[in-house]
Image (cartoon, grey):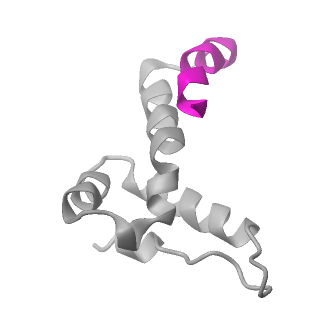
């Protein structure tokens, strides 16, 4: 749902078309990055083939490190799966 706000936010921030597309990708797909092991190989390939995969990997790690689980650890970090080159 947050991705639906991207055009409005992009306008306010005066983002270029490229910046808007990057922001949309990150917002729309970041939840999938947290569920990496549950994604189909097709979905993993789609993310890994994106020109913004490095940005996604960094966002996923930062987001995961900020989420503390009940056992005191953070969510799993999958950035190495996203950027495997």
Q: Is residue 48 left or right of residue 58?
A: left
Q: Is residue 23 left or right of residue 14?
A: left
Q: Residue at x 54, y 23 (%)?
A: 4
Please report the bounds of the magenta region as a residue range.
1-14
Find out whether residue 18 is within the magenta segment: no
Q: Position of residue 72 (x, y in %)?
A: 80, 85
| Residue 9 to residue 51: above or below | above
Quadrant that contains the C terminus: bottom left
Q: Position of residue 30 (x, y in %)?
A: 51, 51
Image quarter for residue 54? bottom left
Quadrant that contains the N terminus: top right
Q: Please identify the dominant SS of the magenta region.
A: helix
Find out whether residue 11 is within the magenta segment: yes
Image quarter for residue 40? bottom left
Q: Position of residue 42 (x, y in %)?
A: 19, 57
| Residue 1 to residue 66: above or below | above
| Residue 41 to residue 50: above or below | below
Q: Is residue 39 left or right of residue 28?
A: left
Q: Residue at x 73, y 68 (%)?
A: 67
Q: Tell how many labels.
A: 0
Q: Residue at x 50, y 44 (%)?
A: 26
| Nearer to the camera, 48 or 32 | 32
């Amino acid at each position: 749902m947050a991705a639906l706000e991207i055009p409005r936010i992009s306008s306010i921030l005066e983002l270029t078309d490229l910046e808007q597309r990057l922001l949309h990708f990150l917002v729309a797909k970041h939840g999938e990055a947290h569920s990496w092991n549950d994604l189909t190989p097709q979905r993993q390939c789609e993310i890994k083939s994106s020109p913004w995969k490095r940005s996604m990997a960094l966002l996923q790690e930062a987001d995961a490190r900020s989420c503390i689980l009940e056992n005191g650890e953070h969510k799993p970090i999958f950035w190495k799966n996203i950027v495997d080159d």
